[in-house]
Image: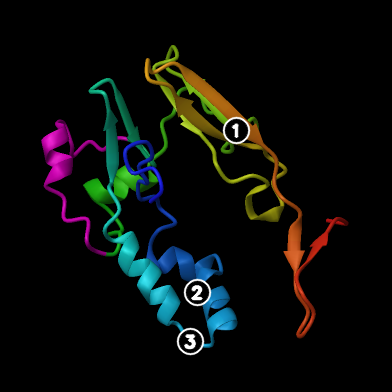
Amino acid sequence: MKYPDRITLIRGNHESRQITQVYGFYDECLRKYGSVNVWRYCTDIFDYLSLSALIENKIFSVHGGLSPAITTLDQIRTIDRKQEVPHDGAMCDLLWSDPEDIVDDWLVMEGYKWMFNNQIVTVWSAPNYCYRCGNVAAILELDENLNKQFRVFDAAPQLIQTDNAPLTGRHDL
């Protein structure tokens, strides 16, 4: 919101009601706020996030990958994104599918990975995924000339909370 002309948030597979319930966001909101209203407001906002971004008519960005049901950008523009992510179809593909070059493993441990002769890059922005994978994460920055720079970072220490104790960093994981 601070830099709307410089940063565009796009919807990913975790920005759905079902996935936020599976991965703990629903429970966290209930625990912290005593009701599910905050969770409901957040998931309603997720429905308004863009499904993709086009940067200077040169770089196409999407959370997941391409869809066999989509051959033009106009087809993406006509998708009704103000809904829960369906289990199949074009919207699901954009948020869930992963490009495959030669599949060695299923996680980008270095934070980003170039594929298809450097035509596609996967950027992984969840460090130490699920507090168990040990991966780093990255952010791709583009300057005014579309020069690319990756910012790679580690996970913050996991925070734990006992019933009435404040959150503390846990370093023994």
Q: Position of residue 112 (x, y in %)?
A: 55, 29
**Residue that appears at 70% across and 54% down:** 131
Q: Which residues are magenta?
A: 66-83
Compare residues 122 and 87 and report the one nearer the observer: 122
**Residue that appears at 72% across and 43% down:** 134
Label 1: state its secondary structure: loop
**Cβ–Cβ under 8 Å for marks 1 and 2:** no
Q: Disc 1 residue type?
A: Gly
Compare residues 28 and 85 and report the one nearer the observer: 28
Where does label 2 land, which residue? 26
Residue 116, by quadrant, is top left
Q: Residue furthest right?
A: 172
Which quadrant does the C terminus fall into? bottom right
Residue 108, by quadrant, is top right
**Residue that appears at 44% across and 76% down:** 38
Dominant secondary structure (helix, strand or loop) of the stretch shown in magenta: loop
* Of the two numbered discs 3 and 2 in the rendering, the one whose residue sits closer to the viewer: 3
Q: Which mark is residue 111?
A: 1
Q: Disc 3 residue type?
A: Ser
Where does label 3 land, which residue? 35
